[in-house]
């Protein structure tokens, strides 16, 4: 009898709502975006519109490894029809940003360095055609693999949960967490009220009361996304009873670092492979192999 190896640990990346991906881009008037990672004097944009437009008008934009390799900036650049210039991406571990189009980005690096060598920093006709072809490939890749819905679908497929109908998405902390927020957006977009986030993550829902100045990154890209009708607030009152009666097909912990409410109860009701743990930390000291040992599906961003 052949042994069947079931893989319980999986790479995962940030993702971006499909509605944020540009349909067309304006005429570009600068080779490289003025926004420079880590240079605070260049962080001059206070609205999403102005921030996105900076990338739309640029051929390339610098992005780099910060505390972790994965960064929301990568996806914002791609979504706005700009090519990330990502020095040292070749050094990224193979299982980190495993879903990211690294080979296409390397081609972009080479093209940027070629154009940058010209005295006027302006692409010639041949380079422009190469640029447009590569940009379109990256936009297509982003739509195909890097949207929030595609990432939620990827999680479902890896955890063998594609036929599920009801999902409980739990958080120990409702403050912004990119991976938790964007992946939740994907699940909510696919399932609506059939995916219940508890407690409610208020900033991903449309509201006039969001204090953007109090949110990480001014809430750009990951806030004010979902209509309030996509959540049934009354379900909050019956969460524990619904867990006990196993009304959810599986459980997702949006960030197991930031709390795992009801885990003791859930562990008595649900099989280990019906529990999914997400780790979106830049730097983590967690022993994620412990979750795997227990039989959970564990998705790690900086693997």
Image (cartoon, helix red, strand yellow):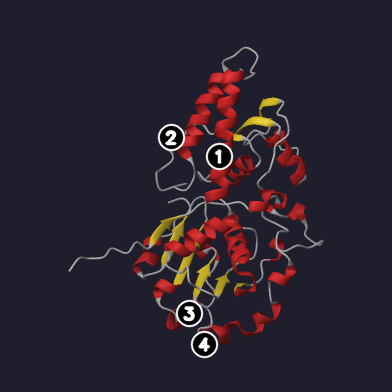
Q: Residue beneath label 2, please? A: 90
Q: Of helix, strand and loop, which one carries label 3?
A: helix
Q: Earlier in the sequence, mark 2 or mark 3?
A: 2
Disc 2 on helix, strand or loop? Answer: helix
Image x and y of residue 211, in percent: 78, 57
Q: Which badge, 1 or 4, comes first in the chain's sequence? A: 1
Name the quarter where the N terminus is drawn: bottom left
Instruction: Answer whether labels 4 and 3 touch (C-beta < 8 Å).
Output: no
Foreground mark, 4 or 3, reads 4
Q: Is residue 117 above or below residue 108?
A: above
Distance CA(mark 1)–CA(mark 4): 45 Å
Q: Which residue is mark 4?
A: 245
Q: Nearer the viewer, mark 2 or mark 1?
A: 1
Residue 85 can be seen, yes or no: no
Element type at mark 4: loop
**Looking at the image, is mark 1 or mark 4 nearer the viewer?**
1
* Disc 3: which residue: 266
Query: Which residue is labeled 1 in the image?
Result: 138
Pinpoint residue 56: horizontal percent, then vertical percent: 69, 36
Taking depth in this image into account, of 287 and 127 the one nearest to the observer is 127
């Amino acid at each position: 009898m052949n042994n069947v190896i079931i893989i319980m640990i999986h790479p995962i990346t940030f993702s971006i709502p499909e509605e944020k991906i540009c349909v067309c881009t304006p005429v570009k008037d600068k080779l490289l975006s003025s926004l420079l990672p880590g240079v605070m004097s260049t962080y001059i944009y206070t609205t999403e519109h102005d921030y996105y437009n900076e990338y739309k008008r640029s051929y390339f934009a610098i992005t780099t490894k910060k505390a972790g390799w994965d960064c929301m900036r990568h996806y914002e650049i791609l979504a706005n029809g700009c090519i990330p210039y990502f020095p040292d991406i070749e050094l990224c571990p193979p299982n980190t940003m495993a879903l990211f189009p690294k080979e296409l980005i390397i081609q972009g690096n080479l093209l940027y360095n070629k154009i940058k060598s010209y005295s006027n920093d302006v692409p010639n006709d041949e380079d422009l055609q190469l640029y447009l072809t590569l940009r379109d490939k990256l936009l297509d890749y982003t739509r195909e693999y890097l949207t929030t819905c595609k990432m939620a679908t990827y999680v479902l497929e890896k955890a063998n949960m594609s036929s599920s109908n009801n999902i409980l998405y739990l958080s120990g902390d409702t403050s912004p967490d990119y991976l938790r927020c964007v992946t939740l957006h994907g699940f909510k977009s696919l399932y609506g009220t059939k995916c219940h986030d508890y407690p409610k993550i208020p900033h991903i829902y449309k509201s006039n009361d969001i204090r953007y100045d109090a949110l990480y990154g001014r809430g750009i890209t990951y806030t004010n996304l979902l209509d309030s009708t996509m959540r049934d607030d009354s379900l909050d009152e019956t969460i524990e009873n619904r867990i006990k009666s196993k009304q959810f097909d599986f459980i997702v912990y949006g960030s197991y670092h930031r709390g795992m409410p009801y885990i003791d109860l859930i562990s008595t009701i649900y099989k280990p492979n019906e529990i999914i743990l997400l780790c979106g930390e830049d730097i983590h000291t967690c022993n994620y192999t412990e979750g795997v040992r227990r039989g959970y599906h564990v998705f790690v961003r900086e693997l």
